[in-house]
């Protein structure tokens, strides 16, 4: 059970409080809570909103990786004991993607766990049960040390074993590198940034070529065909690039 040791000041003006980014967006530092326990998530959201931060949540490691790409949080609060992909594995993927600050919040509070967390590159470690004011103070301290927002340099999709390096323009699928042309990479990266949502033909054309025309639509279809062939060379049953009739394409990440 998480300790609640500080009474919430519910009379605090709304303008001074953060918001829940699962509901709305206001420009303040964005925090991502990665926690599979709904009660703990609710409590942390309330604490951090009262502390003046905007918050969002993910109930699994896979969802967290997607939200890091989509919403670019300024800091991640990460639980360790989660099913399917635990906090340690999630942390490893995060560190290949970005240097966004990470604070572990876990019931695992042994000296060995804390040391392991620091060795793995976390910025702070809070054990459960925690004090409300301690969470806010540690978040504030880590954000102050971190400075400007981190950029996502890799897109990682563990469920389909796909890694896209945005800086070096490298693609690794099932532990093997795929040689893509610059335009092929641009098309794939456009779908990956939006995954798993559909990207329209118009959006792909505009982002990759800067123009929207029938010719670019034909180019998109041809490049998708080539990319699919290269994925199939590694895994014949690959079906990562999905055509959505009359709408566009999406990247399958589950």
Image (cartoon, rainbow, N blue to C red):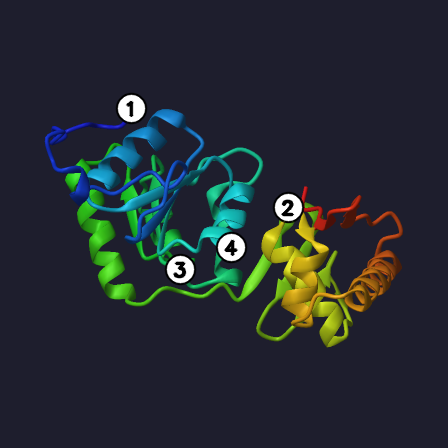
**Foreground tag (3 vs 4):** 4
Residue drawn at x 51%, y 55% as measured from the top left: 69
Q: Is residue 17 left or right of residue 242?
A: left
**Foreground tag (2 vs 3):** 2
Give the SS element for disc 3: loop
Give the SS element for disc 4: helix
Q: Which mark is residue 100?
A: 3
Residue pointed to by mark 2:
196
Q: Which mark is residue 174?
A: none
Residue 89 seen from this side: no
Q: Is residue 40 above or below residue 151?
A: above
Sequence order check: which comes first, mark 1 or mark 3? Answer: 1
Give the SS element for disc 2: loop
The 10 Å Cα crowd at callout 1, few under 14, some 14 to 19, many 20 or more, is few
How far apart marks 2 and 3 lie (CA) works out to 22 Å
Which is more toward the observer, 225 or 77?
225
The 10 Å Cα crowd at callout 2, few under 14, some 14 to 19, many 20 or more, is some
Give the SS element for disc 1: loop
Residue pointed to by mark 4:
69
How far apart marks 3 and 4 lie (CA) works out to 11 Å
Kindly check if marks 2 and 4 are in contact, taking CB atoms under 8 A apart as contact: no
Residue drawn at x 75%, y 69% as measured from the top left: 184
Tally of numbered discs: 4
Q: Quadrant of residue 40?
A: top left
Q: Position of residue 10 (x, y in %)?
A: 14, 29
């Amino acid at each position: 059970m998480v300790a609640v040791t500080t009474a919430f000041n519910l009379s605090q003006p709304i303008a001074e409080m953060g918001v829940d980014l699962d509901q709305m967006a206001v420009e303040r530092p964005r925090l991502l809570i990665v926690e599979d326990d709904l009660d703990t998530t609710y409590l942390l959201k309330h604490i951090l909103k009262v502390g003046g931060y905007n918050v969002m949540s993910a109930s699994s490691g896979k969802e967290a990786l997607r939200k890091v790409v989509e919403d670019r949080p300024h800091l991640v609060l990460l639980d360790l004991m989660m099913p399917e992909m635990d906090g340690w594995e999630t942390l490893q993927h995060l560190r290949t993607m970005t240097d966004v600050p990470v604070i572990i919040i876990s019931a695992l509070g042994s000296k060995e766990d804390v040391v392991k967390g620091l060795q793995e590159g976390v910025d702070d470690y809070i054990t459960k049960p925690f004090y409300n004011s301690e969470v806010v103070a540690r978040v504030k301290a880590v954000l102050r040390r971190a400075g400007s927002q981190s950029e996502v340099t890799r897109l990682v999709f563990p469920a389909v074993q796909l890694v896209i390096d945005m800086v070096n323009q490298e693609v690794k699928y099932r532990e093997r590198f795929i040689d893509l042309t610059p335009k092929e990479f641009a098309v794939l990266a456009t779908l990956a940034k939006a995954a798993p949502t559909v990207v329209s033909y118009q959006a792909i054309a505009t982002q990759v070529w800067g123009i929207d025309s029938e010719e670019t639509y034909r180019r998109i279809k041809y490049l998708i065909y080539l990319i699919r062939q290269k994925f199939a060379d590694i895994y014949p049953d690959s079906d990562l690039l999905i055509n959505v009739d009359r709408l566009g394409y999406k990247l399958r990440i589950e």
